[in-house]
Amino acid sequence: MFTMDVILGFVSFLLTLLVLSYILAGDNPFFRVATYAFIGVAAAYVVLVVFQQVLWPKLVLPLITGTQNGVPLTQVQRVLLLAPLLGGLLLLTKLSPGFSRFGSFPMAYLVGVGAAVTVGGVVMGTIFSQSLAAINLFPSLSQVGTAQGLVALVDALFMLIGALATLFYFYFGARTRSRQPGQPPRRSRFIEGLAWVGQIFIAITFGSLFAGVYIAALTALVERISFLLNFSPIL
Amino acid sequence: MADQIRCPMCSRLNPADLDVCQYCQARLKPLIAGSTPPVPPPTPPSQPETPSQNADQPSEEAPDWLHSLRGKEETGASEWDNTAESSSGEEDIPDWLSRIREKSDSGPEETAPEPPASSPPAGNELPDWLTGATFEEPAQQSQPSAPSGDLPDWLRDIREPDERSAPGPAGPASGPEEQPGDLASGGEPGWLEQLRSQQMVSDSPSAPPPSAAFSPGGAGENQIPDWLQSSPPPQPPQPPTPAEGSTGSEQPSEDLPEWLSNLMGEPPSTSSEPSILPWAAAGEEPPAQTPDFTMTGAGQPMDWGGAAVFSIPEPGEGAGSGPAQMGQENISPSLETPGETPDWLSSFGEPSPGADQVEPDWLASLENPPAQSQASVPGEPGPAVEEPQYYASLQQTPPAESPEPTPDWLEALGSDQPAPPPASEPTPALLFEESLPTPPPGEPVEPFVMADLPDWLSALGPAESGQAKESGQPPAQPSTPKGTEPAEPAEEAIVPAELPSWVQAMRPIESVAASSAAPPPSQETDQRIERAGPLAGLKGILPAEPLVAEYRKPPTYSVKLQTSESQKRYAQLLDEMLANETEPLAHRAERLISSQRVLRLVVGILVVAAVLLGSFYPFMPIPSQPAVEMSNLYNAVEALPGSAPVLMVFDYEPALAGEMESAAAPVLDHLMEKGARLSLVTTSPTGQALADRLLGSVFTPEAPDYQQPYLDRQAVIDLGYLAGGPAGIYSFVINPGLGAPRWAADNSNLQDVHSLADYRQIFLLTDSLDTGRAWLEQLAAAGPSVPGLDEVPVMLVTSAQAAPLLRPYLDSRQADGLLNGLMGGAQYEQLLQRPGVANRRWDSFAGGLLAAIVLVVVGGLVNGTLSLFSRRKTKDEA
């Protein structure tokens, strides 16, 4: 009678109630039990997944069998597999204060590779594309005369002003005014105006982000309440 | 005082057992005991050897110094011989002695006794009274004043024999051919005549000229009384050059009294103690008794004319055989009894009222000659010892003009004295670093208590007064001894006597300070007393030790900070200012409407209630007009051909699984309806579990046929977990077969998929900006490397919180479609016309939205109202 689904359902129902106890009692031990269990289970699951899907099929098995995903590896490929093995062992030396300096080599490799990939992606995938996108919003001159062109133009200008205003909001360069030597350094009025407009756009953005977070959380709540409502008859 | 010794330098009392003064480190006991062989004194046959007898059997009251003097009788004669004959011995003879001898050899021409030289002979420690003694007034001897009631007995005794004895020719003095103290034809004192007579009787060939003892220039035999010549002086350590005229007859060492010979310079046991009296060497007190030499041969005290302070011992009373006996150690007591000290001599040992309540310094100097005396060295100044006060008195006190001529031998004593130093350059006295008692300014320093001094001694001759004038010292007032007539006023044309240099060097600081020309004691260069080296005790010499070797205690500086009241006040103010800076500003606590716990509870209950009511009472329909980006997604999926390979990326967290499932379920259902071959991949370790959960939520209990292959996992392949974040994504994008851990080329779902460009669509299911942006960026970065990858549409299925952040990528054409949250799912289900999970949760979702809207509006209104009233309050308070 008690199938695995029922058991798992019951555990889910219980953990859900423990988490919802935060509304009534705040940070209480029941809530902490649920969070600690989640963290522990998640950590263990991650370890298993990493070993099962990364270390074993890509490092251990190829070194042993000489094949990877059924594809035989050459001797060079097999020798090159020693590099990640050595790097992984050196990373373990980070646990010891005396030998932690040996783990700096693989750590540096990881950081370097990751930084290179990230920077390339940001440059190619965000900066260039977003800049082009902002430029492409403006309609052509031929389309400006039309209604759609005009609306597009307004939208483009709005987008451009918003983008520039947001950027200028984060511009803090200022110089002392010779006319008022006793006054603190202040930005120019033009920049001050754009920064003020940028504040508006930033505020709207933060508002939308907050709304999205609330909606996500509300959706999660709705899902959990729905689960409780659907599981309770079973109990 | 029997167990104490007076220091000859500082005149301070020291215990008798000490050899060195505990104050000034001067030697207390002369090192002459046993240093010279005793010289048997020539004894006249008629004269009983009383001195020797006395030496052998000293009376009970005879002081030790007397005994020590007597002990040297045997060595006196030989010492005189050695001293006179040997050239090496000449070095030990002081200058004054040599000069005496010279004068004695030269004859009686040199009669006028010159005032004692201001600079004493080098190293000669003879007291001033002995060298520059006012033998110039022997007239007093020939004209003895009627003894008054104040005269001491010894003086009376001296004068009485003189009065009785007619002045005759010179006595039988064999030694000195001429008597010092040149008297007139009838002016020779009787005592002197007696001495001469005695001397003639003894007529010892080895008898030294007693004048040598008195005349530093070696006046010769004629100037030395017989009684002095009879006592052989001890061998001086560094005898000065004796007079050339020293003959064999000049044997002062045999005839001079021992004490005198000691002063002349005995061969000291140490190099720095040449002339120390025997009794001083014995470390005894000065003899309280009159030396024998002070007594005449008749046993009467000799009349020195107010100059000499020694008396001739009484021959009948153990004083010896006249002058021959003089100088011996038989310095017997006074005339009356062998053991009785004359009053005048005993008075020397008594503290004088005007002095330091102790015996006179001159007598003390005889007892304790300067320990570091360099008297034997000719030409050098005297040691830095305190000169007895009588020295100064002799210089200060203008010698009274004596009606009687000064004996030749006495004058000769001062004639050969070197000229005193000019007054502008006074010889520094013997000083010590310790402060010495200084007499009142202006008050002359007198060595004697005038009440106890005889006339001839208190009334100094013109030589002394003249010497005092030259030295710049005020003439000392003559002291009138008891029972004697007052001396003549000193201010009547008194010529200061010329003190020998060594005598001047021994002057006490008082005499120097009293003089106006005296340099201030602060002159360190002149007043510094050498303490090391052979010149220890002297002053005014170059330092033997370098100044750097002298240890001086470093000055101690107070570490305490000296601050004034104003500084303390300023420091206090600064401290208060700094303390105020660290103190937090007083902040007025904001009044809370309610506690946070109650607020949280209320809000929570309200939201849950709204969610529940909404589920039971739907009040908000689903928006029918979908968004453009969602329409594009729908259209893209709708346009998929059958069995098209589709890549689905599950990169969302379990916390938002409910929302993601609400949004992705209709899309997955649509893909299943299209028969797409799904390839699942994730960069999250929990992605594979979430994918299975999503597939289970899609399936309806009444699973349609098109969903069956997915239930069998035939049309779905799990490519595994991509490790490394962006690097793993990039690797997978470049080469999916190498990047994906579970890439199976032989899988039917991957039969025509070799690269990522072979997929017809890529669905990105994410709930965060990071993962979505990472996939989009790597796809854009690897685009040039993977041909055709730009043609593959990318669809975004995101959570409501990530949708605003990922929308720019949609506007930049990096993503082709966007579906966010439960609302998007609901709208997508409307498009599919298959209500699903999203439709079932929409009412609850709507209720929650309504509650949120109400809370936001109400909270805003309340907060705005409260802030408005608080501003007014602040303005009113301001």
Image (cartoon, coloured by chain):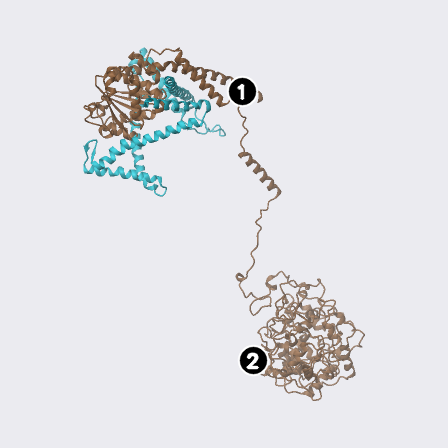
Chain colours: A cyan, B brown
Mark 2 is surrounded, within 10 Å at the Cα level, by few (under 14), some (14 to 19) or many (20 or more) other residues, namely some
Q: Which chain's residue wears label 2?
A: B
As drawn, which residue projects farthest toward the bottom?
B45
* Dot 2 amino acid type: Ser
Q: Which mark is residue B88?
A: 2
B752 lies above or below B840: below
Spatial CA distance of label 1 from label 2 is 122 Å
List the residue tagged with mark 1: B870
Label located before the other in sequence (1 or 2): 2
In the picture, residue A151 is in which quadrant? top left
Q: Position of residue B617 (x, y in %)?
A: 40, 11
| A44, above or below B512, in the image | above
Q: Is residue A205 left or right of residue B649?
A: right
Q: Residue at x 64, y 63 (%)?
A: B434
**Image quarter in which the N terminus of chain B is found:** bottom right
Q: Chain of mark 1?
A: B
B70 or B414, nearer to the observer:
B70
Three-letter amino acid code of the residue under disc 1: Ser
Decide which of B341, B699 is in the foreground and name it.
Answer: B699
Query: Does the rendering let one see residue B81?
Result: yes
